[in-house]
Amino acid sequence: MIVTIDGVAASGKSSVASGVARALGIPYVSSGFLYRAATLLALEAGLPPSDPAPLLALLRGRPLRLEPLAGGNRVWQGERDLTPGLHSSRVDAGVSAVARLPEVRAWVDEELRALPEPFVAEGRDMGTNVFPHADAKFYLTASPRVRAERRAQERGEDAGTVEAALIERDRRDAAQSAPAPDARVIDTGPLTLEGVIGAVLAALPARTA
Ligand SMILES: Nc1ncnc2c1ncn2[C@@H]1O[C@H](COP(=O)(O)OP(=O)(O)OP(=O)(O)O)[C@@H](O)[C@H]1O
Ligand SMILES: Nc1ccn([C@@H]2O[C@H](COP(=O)(O)O)[C@@H](O)[C@H]2O)c(=O)n1
């Protein structure tokens, strides 16, 4: 059983996926962690963002392992836990260029499709490209301002600066960020986090709840 939760930057995908997965007693998979990990390694190695060959060689030479847990994901490269370095403004600024590379997308898709079911998968294209036959699909959205205020509070940053960065990341991610035709679209702006989780759980088909 697979439930997909896609959406724009800072729309609440990870938080909602975690709450839904916890309620269902299954893990959640954060596809963005793999793109962020690839970006972190590329930045550390000083690799050119537009050339996939050295990055793929690095990723295949020392494979990453995504550990989906109900409480959150971790990404390992051997014994090194990359997770603490994934959610920085530096990675935020560079990840879209890495995620634009078809070879990197193919690598992520291969990693995700190898994971054992059941799980909740969150990202941008889970319900459209990676898991088109998922049992239930959701797409989260909210205004840039609402998302910026939430992210700014989370990171202790200026909301105006965060809003500009989110709008730019949404623009860069547009190619892979459309909702699936059969996804239920939820505007999280008027809802609490618990309200969004409850709306997703209530909309699940009987066989998945
Ligand atoms: N409905 C909501 N009401 C209030 N706060 C929310 C809601 N949904 C999410 N949040 C908060 O907004 C922030 C961003 O949420 P989250 O990290 O889950 O978004 P995301 O879509 O996974 O972000 P990214 O695309 O950067 O990975 C978090 O602090 C989260 O707790
Ligand atoms: N399915 C996905 C997931 C993510 N991306 C790219 O990774 C960036 C980070 O994702 P978060 O969910 O952690 O914010 C995102 O901005 C995209 O560039 C993707 O392309 N496809």
Image (cartoon, helix red, strand yellow):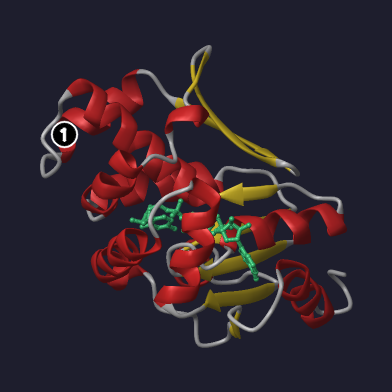
Residue at image position (43%, 75%) is 145
Count the labels in the image.
Answer: 1
Q: Decide if residue 63 is in sight here.
A: yes
Give residue 86's quadrant in the image. Answer: top left
Q: Position of residue 78 (x, y in %)?
A: 49, 14
Above or below, comparing residue 70 to residue 75 in the picture: below
Q: Position of residue 34 (x, y in %)?
A: 44, 41
Residue at image position (33%, 48%) is 92
Above or below, comparing residue 197 to residue 42 in the picture: below
Above or below, comparing residue 177 to residue 78 in the picture: below
Q: Nearer the viewer, residue 15 or 32?
A: 15
Residue found farthest to the top: 79
| Helix, strand or loop for disc 1 | helix
Which residue is disc 1 drawn over? 53
Q: Nearer the viewer, residue 150 or 56?
A: 150
Residue at image position (24%, 65%) is 172
Q: Nearer the viewer, residue 158 or 139?
A: 158
Q: Residues within 10 Å of mark 1 (few under 14, many from 20)?
A: few
* Residue type indicated by callout 1: Ala
Q: Nearer the viewer, residue 60 or 94?
A: 94
Give residue 51's quadrant in the image. Answer: top left
Quadrant occupied by the C terminus:
bottom right
Above or below, comparing residue 64 to residue 168 in the picture: above
Picture quarter with ligand 1 = bottom right
Give left or right: position of 65 versus 29.
left
Quadrant occupied by the N terminus:
bottom right
Q: Decide if residue 57 is in sight here.
A: no
Residue at image position (71%, 53%) is 18
